[in-house]
Amino acid sequence: MDETVIRVLLVDDDSGFVSIVKHVLGPFQGKSFSIEWVNDGEKVIERLKADPAVDLVLMDYYLPHQNGLEITRQISEEGIKIPIVILTANRDFRAAVEALKFGAEDYILKEEITDTVLPRTIINVLERTRLMSQIAKAEKHNLLSYHRNEAERELVVTMCHEFNNPLAAIKISAAILARNQPDGTERELLEKLNQNISALEQQIIKLRDLNTEKK
């Protein structure tokens, strides 16, 4: 995939305006634009599902059957992740707020479209959405790492607890045997048992301390 080529899906029923967009979207800041035109908003979702190889949608506010905001909302509800810029001839900024609320990334007046404003808007939107995607991925990774570390700590606590209980019982049994003052082989075995118990206790302490340091 050529990252210097920005693939734009233009949704507008005015062929004259489409010609203007194609004219102003020339090479800009090392990028070029590949424009696909759809003249009916109802075809947009079908088009995006059939081939999602589109970087950005330029969506006219006024369309036959449904307006651009309704199409934008439907795209969001379908779970299609793609930046959308709303185009309109209306200076009603309440519509701009509605556009952003429905999932559009930006809003631009048709009369302000020039060979610098439109390509710069598209590039800025793509850079912003790319950055937000990276931030979201980093936050997800950090959250997964946190939960993984929490699970590891809980596992260590459980293991220490499971080892300590039987170890304490063995220590009590060893102490009872020692009261009988065994000699010979029995005493040697008891000494080795106590040494092993001590070694296990030290390992459990190290494991517990290591787990505490990770917090």
Image (cartoon, grey):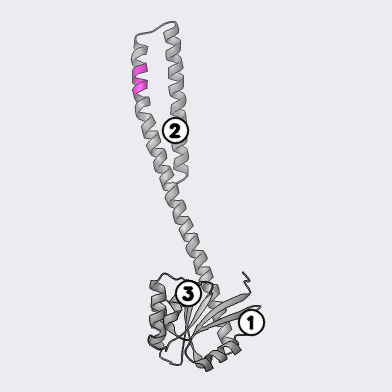
- Could you say whether the residue bearing mark 1 is in a helix, strand or loop? loop
- Image point 62% across, 76% down: which residue? 5
Q: Position of residue 98 (x, y in %)?
A: 38, 82
Residue 194 — which label?
none
Q: Which residues are magenta?
A: 169-174
Of callouts 3 and 2, the N-terminal one: 3
Image location of residue 45, percent across then percent down: 44, 76
Q: Give the residue at mark 2.
A: 205
Viewport quadrant of the N terminus? bottom right
In the displayed structure image, the side of residue 199 where residue 114 appears, left or right? right
Q: Which mark is residue 48?
A: 3
Front-most of residues 18 and 144: 18
Mark toward the start of the polypeptide (1 vs 3)? 1
x and y percent of residue 117 in the render? 56, 86
Hey, what amino acid is under mark 2? Ile
Q: Position of residue 75 (x, y in %)?
A: 42, 75
Of residues 179 and 187, which is closer to you in this image?
A: 187
- Closest to the camera, between mark 3 and mark 2, is 3
Identify the residue position indicated by label 1 in the image.
28
**Marks 3 and 2, how far apart in space?**
58 Å
The amino acid beneath tag 3 is Leu
Name the one closer to the observer, 138 or 180. 138
Q: Specify the principal SS of the magenta part.
A: helix
Kindly indicate the quadrant of the structure image that contains residue 25. bottom right
Q: Is residue 133 left or right of residue 157?
A: right
Q: Of tags 1 and 3, which is closer to the observer?
A: 3
